[in-house]
């Protein structure tokens, strides 16, 4: 099949330049990245290295200044439901219930009411929020809000889920629980996930591949495939060997000024 040989997402020699008043910001320089369907890829790097910019280009929120961003071999021309974004601040509609937040995408696409209800029920159950279906965002914990945000993306038929430090604002215990839940969802659905994080440990725990980015301007320094069996133990020697290697790659560039 052609699709299986074509990367679901491909970034070819992508550069991104922003003009900020009289200053030119080189956010990305000559980035190349190929992601196959079903992979879980983490992007790590210091602030200002272009992680979020790269994610926004894949989402279609930003256009490359040079190079190509492709999905299934076709240029990404703007946002689409097939590429769903999950933000750190949840970005839920405060006036809608959990059920209506999750059903917003399918309803906007004009699907029959019965299909919307069935879709919402499926994903509310998947993220374990059936008892909170009629609650509003202000009645939920941070972890619950993030689960709603993930379910909303999945209900909108996303093939690729783009996550920009989604657990960064959560306490350690909630973060660990949601990491486990995200892995469970990923393994059950076959989704493709691109996940931005500052945490080397989080990247190794979650992903198949860890892409290390360096600042000034943002470049992909290395693309590291992980051979660790799952479930992963953060205290194991193998896990910590990888953490040391990736840490050395990441911190060797700290002398450079972040953009």
Image: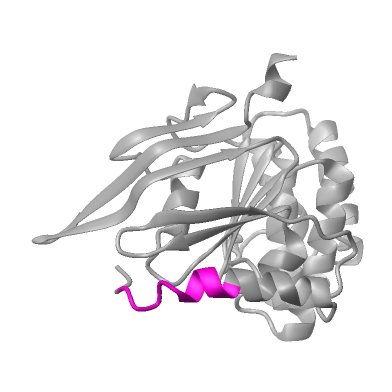
* Image: 251 above or below 54: below
Residue 78 at x, y percent in the picture: 44, 34
Q: Name the residue at 41% across, 45% down.
A: 31
In this picture, residue 46 sits left or right of residue 130: left
Residue 170 at x, y percent in the picture: 67, 80
Please identify the quarter of the rendering in which residue 142 is found.
bottom right
- Where the N terminus falls, by quadrant? top right
- Where the C terminus falls, by quadrant? bottom left
Identify the residue at the far left of this view.
22
In this picture, residue 185 sits left or right of residue 148: right
Q: Nearer the viewer, residue 52 or 126?
A: 52
Q: Is residue 203 magenta?
A: no
Specify how the rendered protein is coloured.
one colour
Give the tally of numbered discs.
0
Q: Which of 21 and 208 is in front in this view?
A: 208
Q: Name the residue at 53% across, 55% down.
A: 222
* Image: 184 above or below 71: below
Residue 126 at x, y percent in the picture: 88, 53
Residue 211 at x, y percent in the picture: 57, 56
- For the question of whether residue 193 can be seen, the reply is yes
Q: Which of 181 and 99 is in front in this view?
A: 181
Q: Name the residue at 69% across, 40% down.
A: 156
Please identify the quarter of the rendering in which residue 97 is found.
bottom right
Please identify the quarter of the rendering in which residue 39 is found.
top right
- For the question of whether residue 100 can be seen, the reply is no
In this picture, residue 96 sits left or right of residue 45: right
Q: What stretch is highlighted in magenta?
A: 247-256
Q: Name the residue at 45% across, 50% down.
A: 54
């Amino acid at each position: 099949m052609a699709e299986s040989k074509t990367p679901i997402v491909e970034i070819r020699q992508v550069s991104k330049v922003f003009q900020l008043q009289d200053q030119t910001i080189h956010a990305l320089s000559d980035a190349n990245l190929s992601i196959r369907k079903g992979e879980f890829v983490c992007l790590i790097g210091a602030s200002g290295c272009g992680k979020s910019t790269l994610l926004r280009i894949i989402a279609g929120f930003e256009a490359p200044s040079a190079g190509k961003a492709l999905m299934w071999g076709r240029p990404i021309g703007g946002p689409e439901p097939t590429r769903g974004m999950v933000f750190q601040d949840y970005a839920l509609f405060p006036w809608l219930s959990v059920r209506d937040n999750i059903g917003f995408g399918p309803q906007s696409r004009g699907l029959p009411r019965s299909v919307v209800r069935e879709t919402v029920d499926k994903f509310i159950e998947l993220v374990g929020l059936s008892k909170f279906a009629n609650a509003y965002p202000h009645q939920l914990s941070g972890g619950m809000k993030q689960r709603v945000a993930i379910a909303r993306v999945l209900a909108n038929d996303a093939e690729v889920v783009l996550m920009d430090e989604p657990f960064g604002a959560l306490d350690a215990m909630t973060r660990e629980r949601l990491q486990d839940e995200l892995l469970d969802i990923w393994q059950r659905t076959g989704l493709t996930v691109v996940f931005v994080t500052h945490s080397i440990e989080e990247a190794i725990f979650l992903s198949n591949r860890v892409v290390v980015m360096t600042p000034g301007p943002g470049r992909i320094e290395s693309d590291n495939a992980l051979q660790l069996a799952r479930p992963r133990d953060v205290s194991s020697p193998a896990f910590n060997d990888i953490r040391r290697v990736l840490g050395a790659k990441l911190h060797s560039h700290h002398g450079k000024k972040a953009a």
